Image (tube, rainbow, N blue to C red):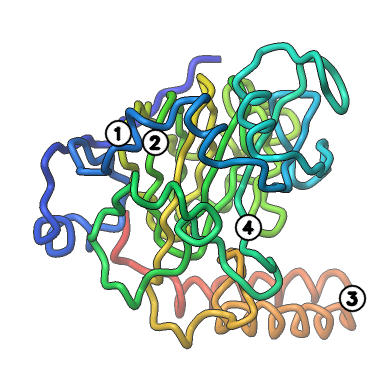
Amino acid sequence: MAWQSIPVPRLEGVSQEQFVQHLYPQRKPLVLEGIDLGACTSKWTVDYLSQVGGRKEVKIHVAAVAQMDFISKNFVYRTLPFDKLVQRAAEEKHEEFFISEDEKYYLRSLGEDPRKDVADIRKQFPLLEGDIKFPKFFKEEQFFSSVFRISSPGLQLWTHYDVMDNFLIQVTGKKRVVLFSPRDAQYLYLSGTKSEVLDIDDPDLTKYPLFSKARRYECSLKAGDVLFIPALWFHNVISEEFGVGVNIFWKHLPSECYDKTDTYGNKDPTAASRAAQILDRALKTLAELPEEYRDFYARRMVLHIQDKAYSRNFE
């Protein structure tokens, strides 16, 4: 089935002032071209990364299929020296493998102690720091993490949202990114922060009939492109080639709004988590009523939430 997509706008030569004052407040995805990212887009070849990254052990996802599913966990975690990971991820077929000769690899870099430390490429891979320049489009105190990502060709990551703003820097290779607005969350069949719909290009509409109502935004990223993904926007990423990317996450809200124990940056703001807990208690209370009454008062609650909490400032 052919899906109509809304192209994500592309702008070249955007200044910090233009981004902060005019583009950022719109809270919509945007591809930035011509940003000075340093030498990484030309230097980070397979050979260079293997040499400079060295034999540092990294924890990776290994999957026998291209579409990775974080809900059913159709992958395994394994550990490889960084140079071996880079070499294997660049291959279509492997002489050495964990599951199968055409298995896919995915690195999402972690802090030194993932329970306490956030990912920061400048700390975990200090020899690469001088090669990359982060876009200075947010205040230094807003910075949360910089995540190094390496993907095998063809790998597709599940649709999910993040709770912080994000620059996806495509350093090498090509990616296709499909995004969905937070306002279309009700069509995405969510399990936590993730969508159950794995195949977004050919979804099972018998199982997921509402998915066809979700507005689809799409862009292709080449080396040197920077995709701005606002917090809460759902995104699905397909690596069309072996590629290296770096995500820069920063805090859109004041620091006290976020869970202080969250080193991955994927826990909902504390107020949202408290509200969800309150709702769970309310639903348990409703369960004390017979079905007819439970249905009636649940619908009244939904209407009340729509009236009091839904914004009228978004399309």
CA gap, disc 1 and disc 2 = 6 Å
CA gap, disc 4 and disc 1 = 23 Å
Q: Amino acid at mark 4?
A: Leu
CA gap, disc 3 and disc 2 = 54 Å
Q: Which residue is found at the position 89% from the left and 83% from the top?
A: 288
User: Which label's residue is closer to the chain start, 4 or 3?
Assistant: 4
Q: Position of residue 232 (x, y in %)?
A: 47, 59
Task: Report the number of discs.
Answer: 4
- Viewer-side residue, 32 vs 199: 32
User: Which label's residue is closer to the chain start, 4 or 1?
Assistant: 4
Secondary structure type for disc 1: loop
Q: How many residues crowd mark 2 within 10 Å: few (<14), some (14–19), many (20+)?
A: many
Which quadrant holds the N terminus? Answer: top right
Q: Which residue is mark 3?
A: 290
Q: Amino acid at mark 3?
A: Pro
Q: Which residue is mark 2?
A: 170
Secondary structure type for disc 3: loop
Q: Which residue is mark 1?
A: 224
Q: How many residues crowd mark 1 within 10 Å: few (<14), some (14–19), many (20+)?
A: many
Q: Amino acid at mark 1?
A: Gly
* Number of the front mark, 3 or 1: 1
Q: Position of residue 94 (x, y in %)?
A: 76, 15
Q: Which residue is found at the position 60% from the left and 45% from the top?
A: 188
User: Which label's residue is closer to the chain start, 4 or 2?
Assistant: 4
Secondary structure type for disc 2: strand
